[in-house]
């Protein structure tokens, strides 16, 4: 089995070519929705598959993350990107204790190998080093995505970030305590 190498990426390493073999595909069957204060798993099916337009937007976002003091990690297998995660630098919340995990994705063929778990661990260490008490995640509401975050120990956020809710109203707003 080939070793997976994890690196903190520099701005000049992030371009569309980096994602040439990355497969952001998800066949969603069920999603979590909050109704009357309770979380319900609903039959909501769709396929999410990123194309050139999504990767171009992603490259701009990740470059901006680094420009503004955040961090991007990449996971590589045979010099091909198989996972990535990013953390933003701006603190928020009533006590300014949150930093946002803005992205975490594993290429379709590399799921189940611990890539996401390792990236999450690297992000948590970085957030703690930056002085955060909690990691904030506006997370995809699919059953599989939520199972991952629950396995990592994430819980529903005590405070919701209104910008995140506005941007992705169907996401689940989560947090992870770094202490």
Image (cartoon, rainbow, N blue to C red):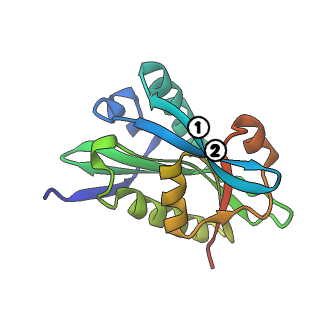
Q: Nearer the viewer, residue 178 or 72?
A: 178
- Element at badge 1? helix
Q: Nearer the viewer, residue 38 or 24?
A: 38
- Could you say which disc has been placed on residue 64 in the image? 1
Q: Label 2, on which residue?
A: 68
Q: Is residue 23 left or right of residue 64?
A: left
Q: Is residue 77 left or right of residue 120?
A: left
Indicate the position of residue 41 as horizontal and vertical percent values. 61, 50
Point 54% across, 43% down: residue:
30
Q: Nearer the viewer, residue 95 or 54?
A: 54
Point 40% across, 36% down: residue:
24
- State which quarter of the image contains the N terminus: bottom left
Indicate the position of residue 33 as horizontal and vertical percent values. 68, 46
Indicate the position of residue 151 as horizontal and vertical percent values. 49, 67
Placement of 121 over or under 19, stated as above or below: below
Task: Estimate how packed mark 2 is, as few (under 14), some (14 to 19) or many (20 or more) residues with alpha carbons within 10 Å.
Answer: few
Q: Is residue 38 left or right of residue 1?
A: right
Q: Residue furthest bottom?
A: 179
- Measured in 3D between alpha carbons, the distance from the residue under mark 2 to the one under mark 1, in whole angstroms, is 6 Å
- Element at badge 2? loop
Q: Residue furthest top?
A: 53
Can residue 132 be seen here? The reply is: no
Task: Estimate how packed mark 1 is, as few (under 14), some (14 to 19) or many (20 or more) residues with alpha carbons within 10 Å.
Answer: some
Q: Is residue 9 left or right of residue 94?
A: left
Can residue 166 be seen here? The reply is: yes
Q: Nearer the viewer, residue 145 or 128?
A: 145
Placement of 53 over or under 77, stated as above or below: above
Point 47% across, 31% down: residue:
48
Indicate the position of residue 42 as horizontal and vertical percent values. 61, 44
Point 71% across, 53% down: residue:
90
């Amino acid at each position: 089995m080939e070793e997976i190498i994890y690196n903190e990426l520099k701005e000049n390493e992030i371009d569309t070519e980096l994602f040439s073999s990355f497969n952001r595909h998800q066949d969603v069957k069920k999603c979590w929705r909050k109704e009357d204060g309770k979380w319900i798993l609903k039959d909501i099916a769709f396929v999410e598959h990123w194309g050139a337009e999504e990767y171009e937007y992603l490259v701009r976002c990740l470059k901006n993350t680094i420009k503004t003091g955040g961090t991007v990690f990449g996971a590589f297998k045979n010099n091909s990107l198989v996972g990535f995660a990013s953390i933003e630098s701006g603190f928020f919340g009533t006590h300014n204790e949150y930093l946002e995990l803005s992205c975490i994705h594993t290429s379709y063929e590399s799921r189940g190998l611990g890539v996401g778990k390792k990236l999450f661990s690297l992000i948590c260490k970085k957030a703690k080093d930056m002085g955060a008490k909690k990691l904030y995640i506006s997370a995809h509401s699919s059953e599989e995505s939520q199972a991952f975050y629950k396995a990592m120990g994430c819980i529903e956020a005590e405070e919701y970030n209104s910008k995140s809710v506005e941007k992705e109203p169907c996401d689940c707003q989560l947090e992870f305590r770094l202490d």
